[in-house]
Image: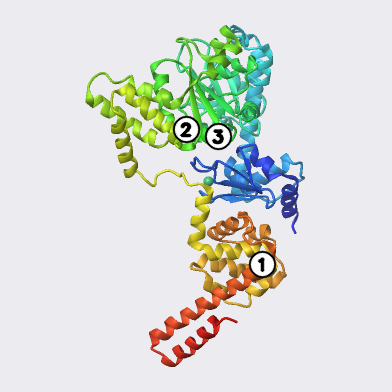
Amino acid sequence: MDTYQSAKEDVKRSADIIDLIGQFVQLKKTGQNYSGLCPFHSEKAPSFTVSPARQMFHCFGCKKGGDIFAFWMEYHKVSFPQALRDLAGKYQIPLPTRNLSPAEKRKKELKDLLFIINQTAAEYFHSTLIKSAEGGSGRKYLEKRSVSKDIISEYKLGYAPDMWDGLTRFLKSKKIEMEKAVIAGLLIQKKNGGYYDRFRGRIIFPIFNLRNKIIGFGGRVLDDSLPKYLNTPETPVFQKGELLYGLSSAYSAIRESGRAVIVEGYTDVLGLRRHGFNQAVATLGTALTKDHVRKLKGYAGEVVIVFDSDEAGKRATARSLPIFLNEGVSSRVMVLPEGEDPDSFVNKNGLDSFLDNLNRSIPMFEFFVDQKLSYITDGVEDKVNVLKEILPVLSGLNDTVQCSLYVQQLSENMGITESVILTELRNFQAHHSGKGNKRSIGEQLSSTRSRNKDGIHLLNLFINYPHTMESLMQVNYKALFSDTIMAGLFDSLSEIYKNEGKIEPEDILDRLGDDQIKEQFREAILLPSIYPSDTVEDAINEFKDRIQKLELSQSFNKAIKRRDMEELNQLLKLKKKRTRPN
Ligand SMILES: [Zn+2]
């Protein structure tokens, strides 16, 4: 085994897969395995399964799966070498140095360099804020907003002085290549040569990823000038559509409480933090996306959106409802008094009052309907249009009791009888059936079984009792499979068994080339054993019997096709012998 492989094995031995994946996905124990909502596709019922015994995960919905490395790569969107480095670092396993391809090497070096440049810039901004003369206006601003020294140092806040070349000169003095600082989004190249600072006259909020590296910055002006917020543009290490400010320090509190609170601004996150509330995160000036919600649902079953009570804020909040419904995350809305944001509110009224409001937040659906109804000015046409907008949302509700309550509410508020709404709802659902993924794991499994029942059952028998391969190799097991995937899988398995005399299911996975074959194998591995140990012999005999029957009927068909009467007579005799009771 090469040293790389052995480091990989060491990491696998040190890591607990439930622990590791549990940091990103809420897992519940179900029998021998754990399950949760898949972070890789939209679903409302959990089909994402993790097996501690097998140290692997598998999603019965989107079929993604594998070991801890596969999870890390998929979740953090990194390559295998990066996943190995990350996990080896996490579990303190020393890694041998490996020769990367030139392209891999360049990519890795660039990313590493961008982290260093960001870190260097953050130090410059931070020290400017806390001790330089140019940082005075930044200090005054944060003081006025009651941002404490502890928060400034915990979140490494900074200040970009109002000058064109403050950071440029600093980076130069640190021997940072200017072109690379442009790639990091910190400097901008002038048309006639030379560089200038992107962030000027702004409070700087470094943005950390979950691995605690600075990947970018948000900058806020001190006055009302525009743009109010300026972020690092997209770079090789910064994709803002899925990032949440504050998540790196909030996620454990969010997981503990099961609730995440989304606020609008960075200072809202910090204001709440200062008062001891550590479950708030902010989007980076973008609308809420499904990627944000998917990230959060790994930690929280419920998300509360706190928004400014202006019209734009209300509309944006209402628009996010379908995202939450699609991701199966319960969502609520907290409305603040006019003119207040969470930061100003908690500073004025204290945390208890904020929590009080939070606990009285209203379900997003109710808020959504209220919003829509408030647009109705007159007559029937308006009502029909609003109903059309509400129906898709209504039909997305999992809870039928909840749904009928809402129908009742709608009927009262809109002055339309319940039966009309229900008829419309049924019509809508009839036209949109098959959408969404509402099937439970059990249903999904049973559909797998009916599609390829014999194959999965045989595989399950074999995985739990590898010695059965000995008997199975004596017969034409392929007769049992309707598809070539299963047949190919068994060929590989019997080959390995023949050569090595044993089979370790988890090790086999890595050696199966085809992705579809891997999927089927993972599913069979994660199913609990179908056959109790004292029925193994019977099971083998049953399979043998089925194989013989199948072979016999195939021969019949062939003989009939050829009109070979002699062969048919032979086969009939054979059949009689088989069916005669002993
Ligand atoms: Zn999935």
Q: Residue at x 67, y 41 (%)?
A: 20
**Residue 370 in view:** yes
Between marks 1 and 2, how big is the CA–CA gap? 46 Å
Give whichever of discs 1 and 2 has the lower sequence position. Answer: 2
* Nearest to N terminus: mark 2 or mark 3: 3
Tell me the quadrant of the picture where the N terminus can be found: bottom right
Identify the residue at horizontal 42%, vertical 24% (top origin): 366
Choose mark 1 or mark 3, whichever is in front.
Answer: 1
Q: Amino acid at mark 3?
A: Lys
Q: Secondary structure at mark 2?
A: helix
Across and down, in percent, residue 438 comes to 46, 44
Q: Which residue is mark 1?
A: 536
Residue 36's place in the image compared with 365, above or below, is below
Question: Which dot, 1 or 2, sits closer to the camera?
Answer: 1
Look at mark 2 in the image and give the residue it sits on: 324
Relative image position of residue 108 (x, y in whole percent)? 62, 42
Compared to residue 184, the image places residue 509 above or below, namely below
Q: Is residue 165 visible?
A: no
Q: Which mark is residue 87?
A: none
- Distance between the alpha carbons at the discs numbered 1 and 3: 42 Å
Q: Residue furthest front?
A: 581
Q: Secondary structure at mark 3?
A: helix
**Mark 3 or mark 1, which is nearer the start of the sequence?**
3
Q: Residue 27: x and y, percent?
A: 62, 40
Badges 2 and 3: C-beta atoms under 8 Å apart? no
Q: Quadrant of residue 352?
A: top right
- Quadrant where the image shows the C terminus: bottom right
| Residue 65 as seen in the image, left or right of residue 229 | right
Q: Identify the residue under disc 3.
A: 297
437 vs 109, nearest the viewer:
437
Q: Are marks 1 and 3 in contact (CB under 8 Å)?
A: no
Specify the color scheme.
rainbow
